[in-house]
Image: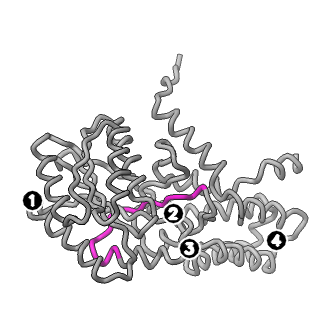
Amino acid sequence: MFQSQPRTRQDDGRRGFVTRLRERLNRGDSWLTYDLANLLPGRRIDADLIEELESRLLTADVGVEATDRIIGGLTRKVARDELENVAALIRALHAGMVEILAPCARPLVIDASRRPFVILMVGVNGAGKTTTMGKLAGRFKAAGHKVMLAAGDTFRAAAVEQLAVWGERNGVPVISQQPGADPAAVVFDALQAARARGIDVLIADTAGRLHSQGNLMEELKKVVRVIRRLDPDAPHETLLVIDGGTGQNALAQAREFNDAVGVTGIVVTKLDGSARGGILLALAEQTKLPIRFIGIGEQVDDLGEFDAGEYVKALLAEPPAQAARQR
């Protein structure tokens, strides 16, 4: 007789994250959960309705390119009379969104042959780099890796203190220097220390900077050059942290940081606030960069791997009150 495998703590954590994602994503000004439920019932699915849906997508940070792709697919289905009811429209909308997001839903894999595996965190001020580092440190340690943090944001004293708190909370060492020290020197020292201590994963912070600040972007390039004096292949992952509420400016950030240091993955944070969630579709359609993680809160377990299907389900889920009325 077939017996199901016992649930693991990782499985439970994954289910818990998905549940919270559905509860918190798009909380507040919803753009699809509420709008679709109130826009569609009783209406014939025609060109006018598709045009109204297009407006919803554009105002939700989905971006022109991704919206055109989604709406183009729906329009063709309407012309072929394939969308006979609301359920069919939502299924088609779900499929169109997943088609855009799925190629970018690529989890971060720690390459054991790279020891230490160096992760460089980049992004603008306030995106949540330091907090994301702390959450990643806890995640990687729970997976059995020896982790070290490097306090490369030497311009903001609070960043060093914040990282120290995360290091203590996770039980991982933090390499830091005095405020105002050369960030490249801090990361260089951390990499040397990580090698000496047999560390598996080194996560290095950098100062937040606007993507348009050329001098600070040059400094970021210097950090990468100095790291490569010790390991020509490092950093092995360069994670761009983006605030989910940034809107279309996120695309400019992705382009500039990618041009400067070669971004290999994206983390989108603060999706539990005013962010409408559409920016992930714009990022996926225009940058094609892997979306490694998304953040939906301040707690350690509020950072999860990006899953395209679950994310779109969360966007399209009906509000509980509306669902209850329709039953």
Q: Which mark is residue 101?
A: 2
133 over 262 or under it: above or below: above
Alpha carbon distance from label 3 to label 1: 37 Å
Local packing at callout 4 (Cα closer than 10 Å; few below 14, some 14-19, many 20+) is some
Which residue matches tag 3?
247
Which residue matches tag 4?
45
Q: Earlier in the sequence, mark 4 or mark 1?
A: 4
Q: Is residue 259 magenta?
A: yes
Alpha carbon distance from label 1 to label 2: 36 Å
- Looking at the image, residue 71 sits to the left or right of residue 118; the answer is right
What is the quadrant of residue 130 in the picture? bottom left
User: Which residue occupies the foreground of this view, 209 or 249?
Assistant: 209
Q: Cβ–Cβ below 8 Å for labels 2 and 4? A: no
Alpha carbon distance from label 4 to label 1: 61 Å
Callout 1: helix, strand or loop?
helix
- Looking at the image, residue 178 sits to the left or right of residue 29; the answer is left
Q: Earlier in the sequence, mark 3 or mark 1?
A: 1
Q: Earlier in the sequence, mark 4 or mark 3?
A: 4
Q: Nearer the viewer, mark 1 or mark 2?
A: 1
Q: Earlier in the sequence, mark 2 or mark 4?
A: 4
Badge 1 amino acid: Leu
Which residue matches tag 1?
230
